[in-house]
């Protein structure tokens, strides 16, 4: 779907006193973005829609940086034929100048008097309220989102600004994956944990390094709570990966350029104190998220400390407060929380190492089992993401997909992994692999994974094994692995049976939805497939 009609097909620069002129390239202007594709537009349109869902705005438009330095309309949601929406903003336009001033901090304007430089533009567009969301990284604005008018004439609130910042972070992650801006990809931080977006292979065989995503998210939640305390301006959390790093700043007040520079100096000094490498400025990304403060703070004092003695990448925390004592006190709290999250992260890494070793048995006879497990893990991860599983359950379902057939060697011995034409006795023998896998995982203390493996052959209609569970009584994670396994058996070239095309496999699964498979999981598979 294209950008649609923009100001009745006219290009409008957004400058005071400017008038619409005919567009240069067709109905839309996303052709001005080198490498832009319909697939990219669909993905960013889905992200853009979150402003309508989560912020309850009525309209949102995404502008991205073009080769000539202007910002062109990539896609939009909610704007109609009669809405005056700029198809392009030139570098000197007031909107772009304001975005540059904001850097990484979204800002809400609930009336034209709050943003005089855009008053004429907003008046011409029939808009009273604007939420402006920069897409900032590596000291550069790669785009911005123009969000308009909350429903029922309500004002944008501080929580809306926080939500906008979270959506912007997801936008930036998507931009990195598109490779539209190579210099942006170079600044990306490789997260040492399972990747988020569907379609990616879960890195469940990764090496341990730093906090995993679940621990880092918990630590940032703690930082946001501390940043909202009386007397605190901001809490900054920095994690390094190789020569690159990313600092997330939870701020209750505006972070100016000099404040950001002071934070970096403090953290660089802390790195040097521990003998850790200091990344170059161009490899140091700063993301600012605003939080609602209980009371404003006077003055600025920074307290900084690293988290030494932990394996993996360096982690540094800074607290900016009105008084030195307040900064040190809140920093001590943040460090205690970071230690707790690091310990739980290490426990998760230990569990992953155990799971990895389960598939480390040498020998060619295990290759089909390993390949099948990796594929089922990938599809299970994607299904879990579409079904909105929490982060912990996403990892559970990916790990369970990897080892769901781990009981097969105990049952089969030296026999082939699968016989394409098993007799009744062989079928009965195969069924025992679910309980054998459960026992093996229980011996390692992996109880939640053991439950998924035990039930991954239960059927929605109650005709499965080993316990003949039905419907919602079957754990959702087991239902997901069941669909993922059958899909891989039908489509994999290393399968023990004749392979069919992905769409044919989907048709087979849809025909059995409500009988063998959970219909909701099958619908999720339809969204996962290309």
Image (spheres, helix red, strand yellow):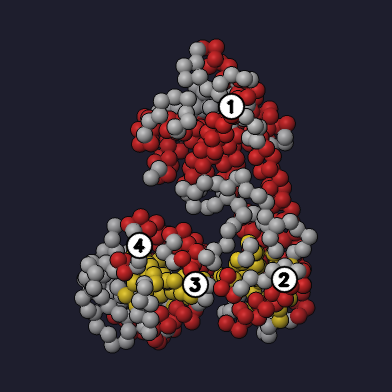
Q: Position of residue 400 (x, y in %)?
A: 59, 37
**346 vs 518, nearest the viewer:** 346
Report the mark closest to the observer, 1 or 4: 1
Residue topped by disc 3 = 136
Residue topped by disc 1 = 365
Residue contact between numbered discs 3 and 2, judged by CB atoms under 8 Å = no
| Mark 2 closeness class: few <14, some 14–19, many ≥20 residues within 10 Å | some
Report the mark closest to the observer, 3 or 2: 2
Q: Report whether 396 appears left or right of 129.
A: right
Report the mark closest to the observer, 3 or 4: 4
Q: Report whether 365 appears left or right of 20.
A: right
Residue topped by disc 2 = 271
Q: Which mark is residue 36?
A: 4
Q: Report whether 326 appears left or right of 496.
A: right
> Disc 2 to disc 1, how far (Cα)?
48 Å
Q: Which mark is residue 426?
A: none
Secondary structure beneath label 2: helix
For marks 3 and 2, the one nearer the N-term is 3
> Disc 3 to disc 4, how far (Cα)?
19 Å
């Amino acid at each position: 779907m294209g950008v649609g009609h923009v100001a009745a097909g006219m290009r409008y620069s957004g400058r005071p006193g400017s008038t619409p002129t005919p567009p240069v390239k067709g109905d839309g202007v996303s052709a001005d973005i080198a490498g832009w594709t319909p697939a990219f537009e669909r993905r960013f349109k889905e992200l853009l829609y979150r402003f309508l869902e989560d912020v309850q705005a009525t309209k949102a438009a995404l502008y991205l940086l073009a080769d000539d330095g202007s910002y062109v309309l990539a896609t939009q949601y909610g704007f109609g034929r009669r809405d005056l929406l700029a198809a392009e903003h030139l570098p000197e336009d007031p909107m772009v100048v304001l975005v540059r001033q904001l850097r990484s901090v979204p800002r809400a304007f609930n009336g034209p008097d709050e943003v005089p430089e855009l008053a004429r533009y907003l008046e011409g567009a029939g808009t009273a309220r604007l939420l402006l969301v920069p897409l900032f990284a590596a000291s550069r604005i790669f785009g911005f989102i123009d969000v308009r008018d909350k429903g029922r004439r309500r004002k944008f609130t501080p929580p809306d600004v926080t939500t906008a910042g979270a959506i912007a972070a997801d936008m930036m992650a998507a931009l990195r994956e598109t490779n539209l801006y190579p210099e942006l990809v170079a600044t990306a931080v490789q997260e040492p944990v399972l990747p988020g977006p569907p379609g990616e292979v879960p890195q469940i065989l990764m090496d341990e390094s730093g906090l995993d995503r679940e621990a880092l998210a918990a630590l940032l939640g703690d930082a946001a709570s501390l940043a909202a305390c009386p007397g605190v301006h901001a809490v900054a959390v920095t994690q390094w990966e190789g020569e690159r790093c990313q600092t997330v700043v939870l701020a209750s007040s505006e972070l100016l350029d000099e404040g950001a520079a002071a934070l970096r100096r403090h953290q660089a000094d802390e790195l040097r104190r521990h003998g850790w490498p200091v990344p170059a400025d161009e490899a140091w990304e700063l993301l600012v998220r605003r939080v609602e403060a209980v009371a404003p703070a006077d003055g600025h004092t920074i307290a900084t400390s690293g988290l030494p003695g932990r394996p993996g990448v360096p982690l540094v925390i800074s607290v900016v407060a009105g008084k030195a004592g307040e900064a040190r006190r809140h920093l001590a709290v943040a460090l205690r929380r970071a230690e707790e999250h690091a310990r739980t992260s290490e426990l998760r890494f230990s569990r992953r190492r155990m799971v990895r070793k389960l598939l480390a048995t040498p020998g060619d006879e295990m290759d089909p089992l390993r390949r099948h497990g990796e594929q089922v893990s990938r599809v299970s991860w994607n299904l879990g993401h579409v079904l909105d599983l929490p982060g912990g359950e996403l990892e559970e379902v990916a790990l369970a997909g990897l080892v769901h057939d781990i009981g097969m060697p105990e049952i089969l011995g030296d026999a082939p992994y699968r016989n394409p034409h098993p007799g009744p006795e062989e079928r009965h023998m195969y069924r025992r692999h679910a309980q054998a896998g459960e026992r093996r995982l229980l011996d390692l203390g992996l109880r939640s994974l053991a439950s998924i493996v035990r039930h991954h052959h239960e059927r929605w209609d109650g005709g499965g094994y080993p316990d003949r569970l039905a419907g919602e009584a079957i754990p959702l994670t087991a239902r997901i692995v069941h669909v993922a396994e059958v899909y891989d058996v039908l489509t994999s070239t290393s399968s023990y049976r004749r392979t069919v095309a992905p769409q044919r496999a989907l048709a087979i699964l849809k025909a059995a939805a409500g009988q063998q498979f959970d219909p909701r999981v099958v619908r999720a598979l339809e969204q996962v497939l290309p």
